[in-house]
Image: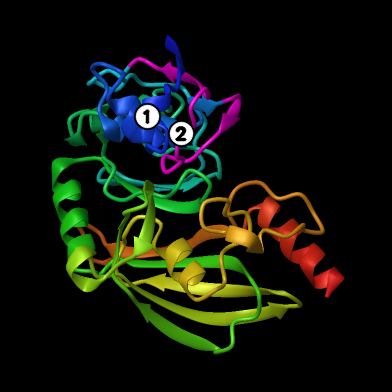
Amino acid sequence: MQRLSLVVDASAAGERVDRWLASRVAGVSRARLQALIAGGHVTVDGGARKSSHRVVAGEHVEVEIPPLPPEELEPEAIALSIVHEDAQVLVVDKPAGLVVHPGAGHARGTLAAAVLAHAPEIAGVGGPRRPGVVHRLDKDTSGLLVIAKTPLAYESLTAQLAARTVRRVYLAVAHGRLARPQGVVDKPLGRDPQDRTRIAVRPAAQGRRAVTHYRVLERLGDFTLVEARLETGRTHQIRVHLAHLGHPLVGDVTYGGRRRRELPVPFEGVALHATALAFVHPTTQQLVEFTSLLPPRFERLLSQLRYAH
């Protein structure tokens, strides 16, 4: 772990902290610095900041630079909740808090490493550091994920995802009461120009088309239980689309804004769970469907919200 301690000089005052660091930390790209900032590896006067923070003369900036993950992923014996497995595919139920594949600040302890330990034959399927991974869930999101165990399965599943024929259904708890019982959010998404670690609704020419179908399942006082179905699968799509409607998800510190009010029960992660998954099996060509019950953290939240309501 490389550690740096820097002091902001007067001539740099007003610069974004990521840009300021990029000009002073040799051999580290601005994109990686942004990821390090988002991962809590950069502090300013002892506190975490966003990449968009404007530095002030005299501020002390501490930087931790973890070593880059190896190109070849090392297997790790981490317990998996396996919903289905055959020669072609592995369907797992990912807990909140588990990162799918290595990235900045998350070199070890990933789902991909656990899958590689469970099924070593997956090595070489897809990317070297994300073997078999055809889609992902955010670290703080739980639920169903399919892994390709063979090149045939990888090709089939990636093609189905591109054709938007994979069915992915999520349950979420959002702040506020959604006015409409159901709807469609068709808003392009792209990197937030003010903070590249975030995703934002963007003009069509500056983002990729993103479509989320939603319906209200239950109103819980100042909260709403929502079912969301992905037509496209962009990064943070459901979280950003519902926040765009003015209803960020419970536990979402990135897009929650000022709606992060106290809850009647402690809650870990984001209130988003991938509850249903369906796709055409790569060899049988039959539609296969899987479901996942809500995890205890989610059930406790709903129980307390119902009681409070």
Given the current orientation, which residue lies at the most extreme right position?
307
Q: Which residue is mark 1?
A: 12
Position of residue 65 measured from the top left corner of the image (x, y, whole percent): 39, 17
- In the image, 153 versus 265, the foreground residue is 265
Residue 110 lies left or right of residue 246; in this view the side is left
In this orientation, does residue 115 appear? no
- In the image, 94 versus 241, the foreground residue is 241
Give the magenta-colored segment's residue range.
Answer: 45-67
Q: Amino acid at mark 2?
A: Val
Q: Is residue 184 above or below residue 223?
A: below
- In the image, 163 versus 80, the foreground residue is 163
As for residue 98 lying within the magenta part, the answer is: no
Residue drawn at (52%, 22%), measured in percent from left and top? 58
Q: Which residue is mark 2?
A: 55
The reply to whether discs 1 and 2 touch (Cβ–Cβ < 8 Å) is yes
Magenta stretch secondary structure, dominant: loop
Q: Quick one: label 2, few (<14), some, or many (20+) residues within 10 Å?
A: many
Callout 1 secondary element: helix
Residue drawn at (40%, 39%), measured in percent from left and top? 100
As for residue 64 lying within the magenta part, the answer is: yes
Position of residue 213 measured from the top left corner of the image (x, y, whole percent): 41, 78
